[in-house]
Amino acid sequence: MSGSPILIGIAGGTGSGKTSIAKSLLEEYGEGEVVVIEQDAYYRDLSDLSIEERQLQNFDHPDAIDIELFNQQLIALIKGQSVDMPVYDFATHSRKSETQKIDPHHVIVVEGILTLHYSSLRELMDIKIFVDTPDDIRFIRRMSRDVEERSRTVQSVIDQYLKTVRQMHQQFVEPSKYFADIIIPEGGENRVAIDLLRTKINAILS
């Protein structure tokens, strides 16, 4: 791969539409040009704890992320090196034995609720984006995702939201939008913002 890659950070609350923006960029440029790295892959491995202890962890706090490994692997990708990204099992709150090989790409998109919280990640980014979506819409999206994709019960999603998610959003996620270069309302549904982002990426690539 010739030339330095572009690193784009996409942050925002749970269910804000970060993934839809990342997918829009992937569709725009193709898998050969763009790779999407999800913050969720870098949750710390809790296999040394009992199942009961794992379920009590605060997964929306910055300490839940293995930021050292996250940062290290992003730097490697920027340098044109391949990495073995962890694969996280949300049902057991632990890392799977297998990893996913990620090769260098021209555009690296990093998405997750806390990606703009960490200064070490921000320093690597060429474009910093925050997706701003109303709380009620985000909660409905999180509910659907956790029940359908992560085998959670409705009550457990509600309990977690009231106990940690809402508080962590106010304490860590929402303030990080002031580090953003671009704030996008409504995520991937905002076609004007996507078009402007594409124009900026093309300008950097050229």
Image (tube, rainbow, N blue to C red):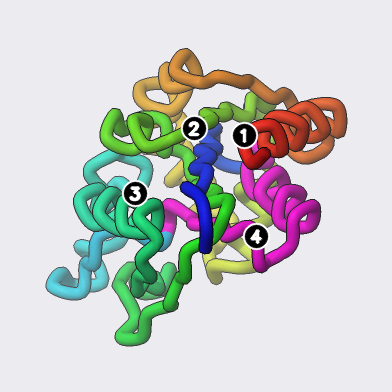
Instruction: Work out whether mark 1 precedes mark 4 in sequence or the reverse, and give the earlier one.
Output: 4
Q: Quadrant of residue 98?
A: bottom left
Q: Secondary structure at mark 3?
A: loop
Disc 4/disc 3 C-alpha distance (Å): 31 Å
Are circles 2 and 1 on residues that touch, CB within 8 Å?
A: yes
The amino acid type, in three-letter code, at marker 1 is Ile
Disc 2/disc 1 C-alpha distance (Å): 9 Å
Instruction: Work out whether mark 1 precedes mark 3 in sequence or the reverse, and give the earlier one.
Output: 3
Give the number of the mark in front: 1 or 4: 1
Describe residue 74's horizontal placement relative to residue 196 as left or right: left
Q: Give the magenta range.
A: 16-40
Labelled disc at residue 33: 4
Instruction: Work out whether mark 4 precedes mark 2 in sequence or the reverse, and give the earlier one.
Output: 4
Labelled disc at residue 126: 2
Give the number of the mark in front: 2 or 1: 1
Q: Secondary structure at mark 4?
A: loop
The residue where tag 1 is placed is 204
Q: Is residue 180 above or below residue 108?
A: above
